Image (spheres, helix red, strand yellow):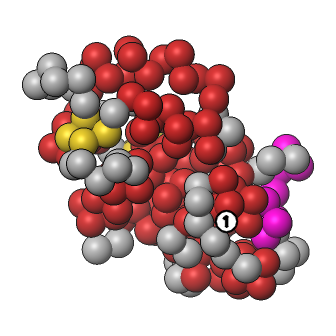
Amino acid sequence: MANVSFLDFQYKISKNKFLRKPSRLFSRDRQNSGLLPTFMPNRNEMKKVFDKIDSNKDGKISQSEYKAILRALGQGNITAEVPKIFQAVDQDGDGYIDFKEFMEIHKKGGGVRTMDIQSAFRAFDMNHDGKISAEEIMEILRRLGESCSLEDCRKMVRAVDTDGDGMVNMDEFMTMMTRTTNDG
């Protein structure tokens, strides 16, 4: 269920989580070697993600709502997998994913996997240069229907840019994401 976790990360970015100063969980020279394989997402954060996907606010996610978010995130190539995802997640068989089912899939999966964070990073790294720029953040937010000025996006980058290059690399992104998924 990497795609559900992937959406969590996209939403965290869209709600300016970059503005919080990250703690340094591991050094740059170790890269990702010190990470645990999973992180349990915060229930309140997951509710925000769920509400973002539930565009008609009926308390459940339809396949079309899920596909729309995937397309907005540039993941339209995986929309064919949505029926299989729903079959696995929809425990009551009503054809929708409610919040209880949404949370249950994260519990069963053991939380958010490191590879989900890496997938989210790749989605933001639109030009595939190994770094996320303020302009790339602004474009992804625009696709998600969120408005954010370029200056605000630059502030987000500065909040996690520990090496001072004006961009977010994988190490900085991992640090930021592992911190925010464990915050209360």
Quadrant where the N terminus is found in the figure:
top left
Residue drawn 24% across the image and 42% down it: 60
Q: Position of residue 41 (x, y in %)?
A: 33, 56
The residue tagged 1 is 172
Dividing the picture into quadrants, the one containing residue 46 is bottom left
Q: Position of residue 157 (x, y in %)?
A: 72, 75
Residue drawn 67% across the image and 75% down it: 148
Q: Which sits in the foreground, 32 or 104?
A: 104
Identity of the amino acid at label 1?
Answer: Glu
Residue drawn 59% across the image and 66% down it: 146
Q: Secondary structure at mark 1?
A: helix
Asked whether, in this view, residue 96 is left or right of residue 75, the answer is: left
Quadrant where the C terminus is found in the figure:
bottom left
Residue extent of the magenta highlight: 128-136
Tell me: residue 89, above or below residue 158. Answer: above
Q: Position of residue 73 (x, y in %)?
A: 63, 44
Asked whether, in this view, residue 113 is left or right of residue 104, the answer is: right
* Residue count near mark 1 (Cα–Cα under 10 Å), binned few <14, some 14–19, many ≥20: many
Tell me: residue 46, above or below residue 71. Answer: below
